[in-house]
Image (cartoon, rainbow, N blue to C red):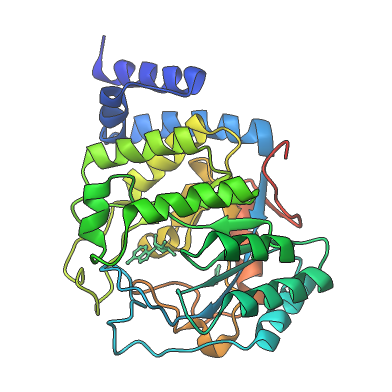
């Protein structure tokens, strides 16, 4: 059997059984061959189209604070970065963002921010309730890090439907090399379980090619996804930020990110899979390539113009100078060019 046909069989097996052995997963992830990449993404597209057709869901991202009490080694808004220009949006500004997003056709809002103690349980609950009241037909997603179960419950009751908390890496040892000692792998995983138990649609995810990541770590990520069964998985290449400990580390590979998107689509057929801004930053056509590899979500920025350039987790982030309306026009055209279509929808998981 030729090398290529061995890999084609692996892809067929993955599409049929949604599973491979650890050895098979690692050899498949690290086989760099354009013909095989096309074969794998064709499989992923077939599954994606079975559940989502040619639709691409949009989420309006509101980056409402870049203050953060954590000091993750990879992240540009970590507390130790004294040169980051900090900002907070007011409740009124956040609600206004959701109104203008609604007018533009968004039916999902993602409130994302650093772990900013100013935004107490109370304040976040009040913002969620305000948006819930004005836009009863929209999904509200929170992405504000690790909190107490009580807070997660309160926000759910106030009207939040979804929560994004990337696990970053499913290997404890690797997690500890990406984060300072005051952050705990076990606590993060616990938060994910709590969110799921409360009834949120939960999104987890990891960076691809973060410093010291090994093949075995990515296989551990895939095993974690199979076990946890999240509704959404956000992945993007690691991109260095000049004011972090990892400034001189190499960026993650776009090709590996694309192969992983296809593999994730095959192991979790109905998952919501964004073609992330990091992917679009690492490659001018990264988001289109992501859609073609099996992704079905995009998350353009709705934050006001004057703060867009300040939510910088990594260098050279795209779309920081564009208005939300321009991004939507641009994305719609980009998506149509590859044969897909942006739709106005909450974009719940298939069958939800
Ligand atoms: N490169 C790529 N992704 C990053 N994130 C944070 N810093 C970086 C970086 N330097 C990702 C993390 C985080 C999400 C909001 O952004 O996975 O959970
Ligand atoms: Fe923002 Fe193209 S998506 S300008």
Q: Position of residue 235 (x, y in %)?
A: 43, 52
Location of the C terminus by quadrant is top right
Which residue is rendered at x = 38% and y = 16% of the image?
9
- On screen, residue 59 above or below 265: below
Visible residue check, residue 268: yes
- Number of numbered discs present? 0
Q: Position of residue 258 (x, y in %)?
A: 40, 44
Q: Quadrant of residue 8?
A: top left
Does 231 sit left or right of 349 as displayed?
left
Q: Nearer the viewer, residue 90 or 215?
A: 90
Q: Nearer the viewer, residue 320 or 115?
A: 115
Which residue is rendered at x = 36% and y = 41% of the image?
221
Which residue is rendered at x = 25% and y = 35% of the image?
30
Does 123 sit left or right of 84 as displayed?
right
Query: Outermost residue toward the front?
Result: 150
Which residue is rendered at x = 49% and y = 30% of the image?
266
- On screen, residue 105 above or below 44: below
Q: Nearer the viewer, residue 25 or 224?
A: 224
Q: Position of residue 125 (x, y in %)?
A: 67, 73
Q: Quadrant of ligand 1?
A: bottom left
- On screen, residue 186 above or below 238: above
Location of the N terminus by quadrant is top left
Does 286 sit left or right of 82 as displayed?
right
Q: Quadrant of residue 243?
A: bottom left
Q: Position of residue 176 (x, y in %)?
A: 23, 56
């Amino acid at each position: 059997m030729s090398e290529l046909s061995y890999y084609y069989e692996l892809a067929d097996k993955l599409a049929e059984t949604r599973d491979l052995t650890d050895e098979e997963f690692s050899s498949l992830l690290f086989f760099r061959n354009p013909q095989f990449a096309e074969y794998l993404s064709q499989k992923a597209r077939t599954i994606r189209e079975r559940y989502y057709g040619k639709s691409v869901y949009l989420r309006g991202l509101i980056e409402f604070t870049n203050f953060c009490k954590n000091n993750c080694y990879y992240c540009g808004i970590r507390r130790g970065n004294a040169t980051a220009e900090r900002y907070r949006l007011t409740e009124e500004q956040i609600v206004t963002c959701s109104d203008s997003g609604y007018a533009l056709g968004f039916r999902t809002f993602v409130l994302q921010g650093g772990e900013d103690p100013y935004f107490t349980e109370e304040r976040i609950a009040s913002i969620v309730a305000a948006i819930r009241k004005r836009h009863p037909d929209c999904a509200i997603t929170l992405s504000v890090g690790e909190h107490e179960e009580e807070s997660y419950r309160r926000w759910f009751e106030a009207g939040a439907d979804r929560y994004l908390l990337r696990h970053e890496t499913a290997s404890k040892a690797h997690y500890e090399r990406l984060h300072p000692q005051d952050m705990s792998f076990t606590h993060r995983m616990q938060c994910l379980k709590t969110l799921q138990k409360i009834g949120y649609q939960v999104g987890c995810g990891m960076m691809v090619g973060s410093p010291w990541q090994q093949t075995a770590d990515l296989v551990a990520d895939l095993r974690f996804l199979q076990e946890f069964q999240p509704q959404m998985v956000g992945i993007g290449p690691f991109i260095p930020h000049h004011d972090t400990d990892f400034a001189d580390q190499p960026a993650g590979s776009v090709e590996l990110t694309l192969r992983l998107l296809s593999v994730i689509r095959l192991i979790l057929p109905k998952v919501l899979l964004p073609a992330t801004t990091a992917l679009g930053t690492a490659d001018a056509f990264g988001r289109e390539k992501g859609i073609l590899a099996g992704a079905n979500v995009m998350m353009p920025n709705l934050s006001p113009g004057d703060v867009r350039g300040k939510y910088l987790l990594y260098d050279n982030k795209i779309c920081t100078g564009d208005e939300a309306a321009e991004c939507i026009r641009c994305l719609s055209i980009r998506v149509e060019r590859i044969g897909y279509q942006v739709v106005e929808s909450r974009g719940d998981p298939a069958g939800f």
